[in-house]
Image: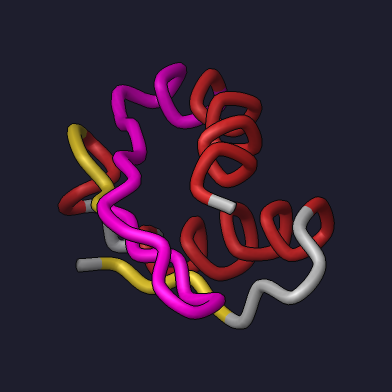
Amino acid sequence: MKEKVEEVLDKIRPMLQRDGGDVELVEVDDGTVKVRLTGACGGCPMATMTLKKGIEEKLKEEIPGLKEVVAV
């Protein structure tokens, strides 16, 4: 599952990088994906929305059985 998560994150990264941020995969554990938002995304007030409405929705759309995405 980790490889599939990386594939999907690679599709999302260009949008984050355009705004000076990025996302780093930390761990995939029992359907939970742990990521670290870096760069401008790390301290952005919209980071939670980016995580839940952007990253989590896209991952759930492409990976059946995914439970949630959390920032660490």
Asked whether, in this view, residue 10 is left or right of residue 51, the answer is right
Colour pattern: secondary structure
Point out residue 16 in the picture as x, y percentages from the top left corner.
45, 31
Judge by depth and name the residue closer to the eye, 61 or 38.
61
Q: In which quarter of the image is residue 8?
A: top right
Image quarter in which the C terminus is found: bottom left
Numbered range of the magenta stretch: 15-35
Asked whether, in this view, residue 35 is left or right of residue 14, the answer is left
Asked whether, in this view, residue 60 is left or right of residue 33, the answer is right
| Residue at the image position 50 percent from the left and 27 percent from the top | 13
Point out residue 31 in the picture as x, y percentages from the top left corner.
55, 76
Judge by depth and name the residue closer to the eye, 15 or 69.
69
Determine if the magenta segment contains residue 32. yes
Q: In this view, does 39 lie above or below 67?
A: above
| Residue at the image position 63 percent from the left and 41 percent from the top | 4
How many numbered tags mark residues here? Answer: 0
Determine if the magenta segment contains residue 9. no
| Residue at the image position 33 percent from the left and 32 percent from the top | 22
Judge by depth and name the residue closer to the eye, 33 or 55.
33
Q: Is residue 30 above or below residue 21?
A: below
| Residue at the image position 21 percent from the left and 39 percent from the top | 38
What predominant SS class does the magenta segment belong to? strand
Judge by depth and name the residue closer to the eye, 42 or 23.
23
Point out residue 52 in the picture as x, y percentages from the top left corner.
55, 69
